[in-house]
Amino acid sequence: MPKFGGFGGGNNMQQLMKQAQKMQEDMQKAQEELEDTEISAEAGGGLVEVTMTGKKQLISIKIKPEVVDPSDVEMLEDLIIAAINDAYKTADEEAERVMGPLAGGMGGLF
């Protein structure tokens, strides 16, 4: 009596499970790397500097005293926004660098 269905044998299933486990381990390592990565960006020639993790968690904002002008708070706000947006962009690029190869490998599992 012929067999129907299944995955073509136990070896294929074991291999698939090993690949999935390795990919999960690699993904965990990549996420840890992003969490440990610090990204800094500045605006206004260094008047405002922000630092965040590769997972986009803001760690610090440094503002040079000479940019603090009570009569022009809007400029300071703009510099902070520009620095944060630049850091986000860099964090996205870093995430793509770290996670990109893993995302490409998932297609082979399904």
Image: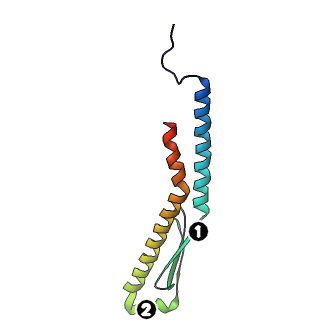
Tag 2 or tag 1, which sits nearer the N-term?
1
Residue 69 is marked as 2
Give the left or right position of residue 32, taking residue 72 as reference. right
Residue under the point 61% across and 62% down: 36
Quarter where residue 62 is shown: bottom right
Residue placed farthest to the top in the image?
Answer: 1
Query: Alpha carbon of mark 1 to alpha carbon of mark 2: how far?
Result: 29 Å
Residue under the point 58% across and 33% down: 16
Q: How is the image coloured?
A: rainbow
Residue under the point 58% across and 22% down: 9
Residue 11 higher or lower than 77, as above or below: above
Residue 72 higher or lower than 22, as above or below: below
The amino acid type found where label 2 is placed reads: Asp
The amino acid type found where label 1 is placed reads: Glu
Residue 38 is marked as 1
Q: Are marks 1 and 2 in contact (CB under 8 Å)?
A: no
